[in-house]
Amino acid sequence: MPHDTPLIATIVAGLGLAFVFGALTNRFRIPPLVGYLVAGVLVGPNTPGFVADASLANELAEIGVILLMFGVGLHFSLKDLLSVRAIAVPGAIVQIGFATLLGVGLAWLLGWSPGAGLVFGLALSVASTVVLLRALQERRLIETERGRIAVGWLIVEDLAMVLALVLLPALAGVLGGQPQVDDHESLLSLPASYGIWGVVGVTLAKVAAFVVVMLVVGRRVIPWILHYVAHTGSRELFRLAVLAIALGVAFGAAKLFGVSLALGAFFAGMIMSESELSHRAAEESLPLRDAFSVLFFVSVGMLFDPFSLISNGLPILATLAIIIIGKSIAAFVIVIAFRYPIATALMISASLAQIGEFSFILAELGVGLKLLPEQGRDLILAGAILSILLNPLMFLVVDWMKPWLEKRAGKAAPAEERRPIGPATEPGQVASVSAAPEKEDGPPPRTTLAGHSILIGYGRVGSLVGAALKEAALPFLVIEDADKTLAKLRDDGVETIAGNAANADVFAAANPEGAKRLILAIPNAFEAGQIVLRARAANPAISIIARAHSDAEVEHLKGLGADIVIMGEREIARGIVEVVTGKTTDWAGPAVEINPQPA
């Protein structure tokens, strides 16, 4: 090559191998992230062949973390965050303390100093942002109560680690290490002369200042920028504005206020969620979020030395036990102590049973301060890799354990969690029912409606259809998985079933056998196809109406049994033709003249 291009080489090798091994693992029904980690090991320095630039890979991965937390913030609001503070704050603090004590104990058995044990335990106590959020997204739990608890828990953990990062350099001498001389122009590091309480006070003041700036200034400036750019009509500028806000706020938060990049991005997304354009912002940033989150897993894989499994076998198993068993038990007990259902406790336990990016940062800082031996860093890296690999298995384990634990407890869920959700109904009517995962662990209550319409999705299209059905006094119910939308529907007296209609139990609760019509207002043709097959099997006579975005999707859905598939682009064209020519067209034959309305 005429010149070195390490950035291009790292991206090409990382994404290329991630695609190959991700496809292979998916073929064998293994989560693709396992393939991404294997790709990272292959391009890392511990295996022969091409070696990618680790520092560049880490920075690319950091962008993925920023965009992912920004996307989560877009689905959150300050009200959502405050609604789970009663469990997220004490739960995260107790779990961090318990995991840290376990880490200190293992360090003592290995002959390390108390300072090394403290750093080691803290590194094992904090979950990976990317892994947790990907797990919640795959299970469509981000906007559920248990998802909000997990994310709130994660935010508290991140805040605790930010505090640890600024306290450790100040405490290094006391803990037996060497104070670190900071050559970077970052406000994350504070002079040790401030004293311990001075460092804590300044750090908390910076975090508070950042929150105030975002709530006072950001709530006005960010939505205004989005609306201004949207009115220009340029999709390119809008996408650029979203990325600039996400990355700019994250970077500014880290440099000016000492807040982590991930937390800064989360708050930027949360503020942006108050704009009417938040859904469009989420859509525009999604492709980059996915690509860079893949690079995060590749960068983690690059750090792993597979030969360490032989040289440090028993210590690695002990480290893994703290991460997977110790943290999970602590989280489970805490959630149960707050009187949440067993399913919620199990899901949060599985979500937190891994470690990631903050663990790596703490490990590097500990080694730099001469607090943590290099063996400790190796154990943390090995524990992170193995816990990420095993995390999908943890969800399978908790699914298997749930019926057994519920049987031992003598109930499937607290009685108050099983009541139908919705406004009071008149005699002969049915209340809104909920199949929300966080509230209901068995099959959801079945509607008593018959001869009704089942409306799947209540977004921009579904809400218009629902309003028309309500105006026409036609009986219908809505299957939706967004909590905010469900709450509004319940307030309006519309019967709802919370969950994913592709789930057999959720769809069966809508009584498809007795339904007259199925209306698929969701844009995902693959998911819609699964629902069409399920509906046609349950009721061959049901009328199925679906939406599509291309001719291929139209043919796909019709082939699976949909009676009518409406493509948005065709309807737009039909409306334009009608306005311009006074004629309507079915696109399959000659134009049909319509009766003009009097002016």
Image: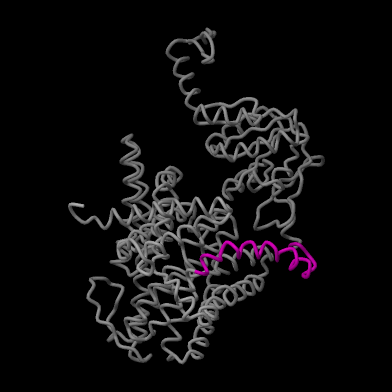
Q: Is residue 477 above or below residue 215?
A: above
Q: Name the foreground residue: 40 vs 214.
A: 40
Query: In percent of the image, x 70 and y 43: which residue is there?
Result: 507
In the picture, measured across the screen, residue 248 lies left or right of residue 109, that is left
On the image, the x and y values in percent for residue 534 come to: 70, 38
Closer-to-camera residue (488/145):
145
Residue 290 placement (x, y as % from top left): 43, 51
Image colouring? one colour
In screen coordinates, is 348 left or right of 222? right
Quadrant of the image occupied by residue 170: bottom left
Kindly give the residue lying farthest to the left in the view shown. Answer: 2
The residue drawn where x is 49% and y is 23% is 570
* 233 inside magenta stretch: no
Q: Position of residue 333 (x, y in %)?
A: 64, 74
Task: Say above or below: 138 vs 194.
Answer: above
Task: Provide the residue span drawn in magenta.
Answer: 386-413
Q: Main secondary structure of the magenta part?
A: helix
Tell me: residue 308, above or below residue 260: below
Count of all numbered marks drawn on residues in the image: 0
* Image quadrant in which you'd find residue 485: top right
Single out the residue that lies furthest toward the right: 428
Residue at 60% across / 31% down in the picture? 557
Image location (x, y in percent) of residue 249: 33, 58
